[in-house]
Image (cartoon, helix red, strand yellow):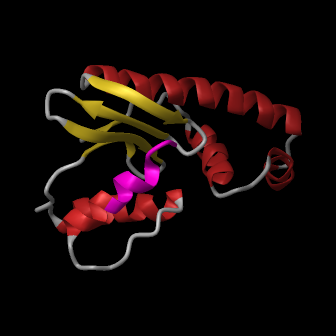
């Protein structure tokens, strides 16, 4: 399930993506030809909007929030409705997504999505051929964001 509720402009997404890749504010400023203060101000707005977007999606899905890392764009929680762990995350490619822990009989596109995000989050998922095992590893890797 995908939502465009982040409220981020394309420029904000570019800033956020650079930070997610490990660039510091001074490096981002230099790369984009702007001041570090402009970058800092932008991140205050980005963090506020993204945090609000992730929490609104969690609330709409009745997810109990367990952790939030705005810099990585990850909110972890638990769905009482489905009795499952949940990751609400922001992807520069697909907006805000909701991923429920489940026995995975997904389409390849679903598996590709969470494998791409795992790589971005620094969660190493061994290639066992089992989407369910990969999903378990992903959830374990992001706990305590």
The answer to which image quadrant residue 64 occupies is: top left
The answer to which image quadrant residue 66 occupies is: top left
Q: Is residue 132 above or below residue 72?
A: below
Q: Position of residue 87 (x, y in %)?
A: 35, 42
Residue sitting at the far bottom: 128
Residue 140 appears left or right of 22: left
Q: How many marks?
A: 0
- Please name whichever residue, 4 or 126, is drawn nearer the observer in this view of the structure: 126
Residue 56 appears left or right of 30: left
Residue 140 in magenta?
A: yes
- Please name whichever residue, 61 or 37, is drawn nearer the observer in this view of the structure: 61
Query: Majority secondary structure of the magenta segment?
Result: helix
Residue at (33, 79) in percent of width and height: 127
Residue at (62, 51) in percent of width and height: 20
Q: Is residue 5 above or below residue 94?
A: above
Residue at (45, 50) in percent of width and height: 142
Q: Position of residue 70 (x, y in %)?
A: 56, 36
Residue 105 appears left or right of 39: left
Residue 1 in magenta?
A: no
The answer to which image quadrant residue 53 occupies is: top left
Q: Which residues are magenta?
A: 137-145
Residue at (39, 70) in percent of width and height: 125
Residue sitting at the far left: 105
For the N terminus, the image quarter is top left
Q: Position of residue 103 (x, y in %)?
A: 13, 56
């Amino acid at each position: 399930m995908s939502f465009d509720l982040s409220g981020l402009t394309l420029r904000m997404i570019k800033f956020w993506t650079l930070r997610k890749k490990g660039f510091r504010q001074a490096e981002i400023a230099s790369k984009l030809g702007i001041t570090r203060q402009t970058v800092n101000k932008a991140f205050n707005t980005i963090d506020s909007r993204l945090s609000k977007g992730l929490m609104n999606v969690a609330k709409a899905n009745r997810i109990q929030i367990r952790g939030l890392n705005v810099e990585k764009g990850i909110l972890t929680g638990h769905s009482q409705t489905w009795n499952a762990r949940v990751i609400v995350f922001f992807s520069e490619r697909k907006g805000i997504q909701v991923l429920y822990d489940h026995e995975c009989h997904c389409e390849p596109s679903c598996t590709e999505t969470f494998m791409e995000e795992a790589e971005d989050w620094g969660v190493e998922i061994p290639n066992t051929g089992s989407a369910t095992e990969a999903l378990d590893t992903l959830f374990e890797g992001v706990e305590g964001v």
